Image (tube, grey):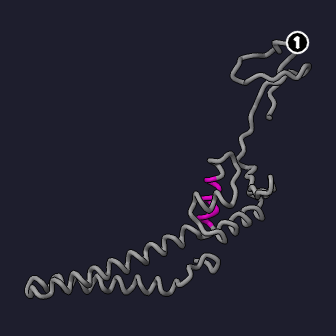
């Protein structure tokens, strides 16, 4: 992981993962020994339980750290913007992607500085617009009167004035 995406207490998390694996291995050894000595079953169960708890806790923390890493978070925000008409706010990012505020604001600032997003103020709210995600619409427009028609209609002459129609991106 890069320094920017480092998990607070990453050493503790990795230590818990290693300890959990050791407890799981020891628990399995005791479980195998319980075939000969029945008194080892509670010890094996306790060791396996501690191992599972440690490994699960560490895995959840490492997965969470990956979800807020810069490259993954930038992609998740871009995907969110694609579903919201190419616009998102920091509050939407925090609530829908379940990320902390500093990570959300940092990712949005990174996207804006990289040219993928543009920051706009609307009614006192910061809105990040993703121009690369906006749809461009093609229409037929009359060169004389300016009437517009859908490209789905197979027209070549304006219904109003009879002028020629040209395809225009809107």
- Image point 50% across, 87% down: which residue? 11
Horizontal and vertical percent position of residue 20: 35, 83
- 3 w.r.t. 163: above or below: below
Q: Toward which corner of the image does residue 147 lie, by quadrant? A: top right
- Magenta part of the protein: which range? 71-80
- Image point 43% across, 74% down: which residue? 59
Point out the residue furthest to the front here.
123
Q: Is residue 37 left or right of residue 55?
A: left
- Image point 68% across, 61% down: which residue? 90
Q: Is residue 126 left or right of residue 68?
A: right
- 58 w.r.t. 128: above or below: below
Q: Toward which corner of the image does residue 134 lie, by quadrant? A: top right
Horizontal and vertical percent position of residue 50: 31, 82
Where's the N terminus, which quadrant? bottom right
Q: Main secondary structure of the magenta part?
A: helix
Name the residue that disc number 1 marks: 161
Residue 91 vs residue 169, the one in the foreground: 91
Please check the rendered image and state whether residue 1 is part of the magenta-colored stretch, yes or no. no
- What is the secondary structure assignment of the residue under circle 1? loop
- Image point 17% across, 82% down: which residue? 31
Q: Is residue 135 left or right of residue 40?
A: right
Horizontal and vertical percent position of residue 86: 70, 48
- 84 w.r.t. 112: above or below: above
Please check the rendered image and state whether residue 76 is part of the magenta-colored stretch, yes or no. yes
Graded by Cα atoms within 10 Å as few (under 14), some (14 to 19) or many (20 or more), the crowding at tag 1 reads few
Q: Toward which corner of the image does residue 153 lie, by quadrant? A: top right
Where's the C terminus, which quadrant? top right
């Amino acid at each position: 992981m890069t320094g920017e995406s480092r998990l607070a207490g990453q050493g503790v998390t990795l230590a818990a993962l290693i300890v959990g694996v050791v407890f799981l291995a020891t628990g399995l050894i005791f479980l195998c020994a319980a075939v000969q000595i029945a008194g080892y079953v509670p010890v094996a169960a306790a060791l396996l339980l501690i191992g599972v708890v440690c490994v699960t806790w560490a895995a959840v923390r490492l997965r969470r750290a990956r979800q807020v890493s810069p490259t993954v978070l930038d992609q998740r925000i871009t995907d969110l913007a694609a579903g919201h008409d190419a616009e998102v706010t920091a509050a939407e990012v925090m609530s829908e992607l379940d990320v902390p505020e500093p990570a959300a604001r940092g990712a949005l600032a990174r996207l804006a500085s990289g040219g993928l997003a543009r920051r706009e103020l609307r009614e006192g709210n910061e809105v990040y617009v993703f121009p690369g995600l906006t749809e461009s619409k093609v229409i037929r427009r009359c060169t004389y009167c300016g009437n517009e028609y859908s490209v789905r209609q197979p027209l070549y002459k304006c219904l109003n004035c009879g002028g020629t129609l040209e395809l225009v991106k809107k």
